[in-house]
Amino acid sequence: MSRRKIIQRDNNGNTNNNNSNNGHHHHHHDYNGSPGTKVLVVGLGQLGLPVAQYVKQRGFDTYGHDISTRAMENAERMAGIKRASNFGDFDVYILCVSTHMPDDIYLPYADNLMAVARRISEEADDGALVCIESTIPLGTARKICTMFNHRLHVAHVPHRWYVHDQERYGVNQLRVAGGIEPCCLAMAVQFYSGDLNGNAFSSNNSRIKGSLGIPTHPVKSTEVAELSKTVENAHRYLQIAFAEELYIWCRLNNIDFWEMRDALNTKWNVNILEPRDGIGGHCLPKDTRMFLNSSQLIKSKILSAAVEVDMDYRNYKKFESQATTTTTNTTTSLKDSNSGIGKNVSIPV
């Protein structure tokens, strides 16, 4: 018999309790997942593979899917993740599909994610939980829920996984969680945090047994969850861009940037970051652009300027590395050259 219609949505309003809670839902019972709960992780790349490993370690019946055969084989070999032959018959779907252009990691692109959602909408059982961990443009979770015809629970629990320090900032760290409906949020919080307080699913009538033991900070809408991810990365982008601009300013004005930075950072609420090779990586440029494009009504002036500053800084570093090969004092030669630095023009290189 099919597992459809196992979950009845609760209409007595009990599910709303979750929304009034401003605190985090930490896991009171660190109970592991049950092998009776089937989880499919879609996207087994840099983010999805550690997620699949974590879900499997927690004891859930874990399957994986990736459009790349190599990524799928790697997950089978490295982590013992089972290959999903289809998308039917799962209790939970965790989407970790990358949301950048295949040929340009700096540009947002959600087509692959929507293709996965389309397949889930055709094959999934009613009442399953779909958790989107990928970073997504504002309004995407709601679009996906409409595609599902509100047949499945949809939640957005953006990842905060950091490749360079997985010990401290791995899969298991405090996450923002938002749901389309209160029942979606309740189910996601139960799956992630194992916190059954104030939510309408008692452990007998939910198809999800056990939890991931990951603390959550519930918010009332998927929109707030979507923005929390792009804005936290845009904020980081801004901090780095400020340091980059300060670096250029110091070089052009004959001030030792590093001494200046050390001095500034002696104040308790100041943290000037270290400018390196320009703002790169999978997340910051793409997510900042995602936020820049998130509204027709307002475009962030400060972030638009930060993107320009980062381009100036990259050009300046190129110029600097070429200039240091000559014997002249870099600062003077730059001030005298008509390089356009300080006039907000890109430096010809």
Image (cartoon, rainbow, N blue to C red):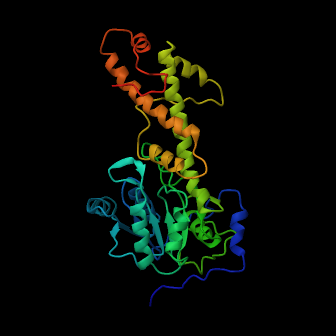
Q: Is residue 16 left or right of residue 96?
A: right
- The quadrant in which the N terminus is found is bottom left
Q: Is residue 280 above or below residue 138?
A: above
Relative to the observer, which residue lies in front, 18 or 213?
A: 18
On the image, the x and y values in percent for residue 260 come to 55, 18
Q: Is residue 187 above or below residue 127?
A: above
Residue 168 showing in the rendered view:
no
On the image, the x and y values in percent for residue 320 come to 37, 20
Residue at x 56%, y 56% (from the top left corner)? 226
Relative to the observer, which residue lies in front, 32 or 39?
A: 39
Q: Is residue 266 left or right of residue 158?
A: right
Residue at x 60%, y 48% (from the top left corner)? 298
Q: Is residue 104 left or right of residue 167?
A: left
On the image, the x and y values in percent for residue 89 come to 43, 79
- The quadrant in which the C terminus is found is top left
On the image, the x and y values in percent for residue 117 come to 44, 69
Q: Is residue 304 above or below residue 336?
A: below
Instruction: Give the number of marks.
Output: 0
Residue 224 showing in the rendered view:
yes
Relative to the observer, which residue lies in front, 53 or 73?
A: 73
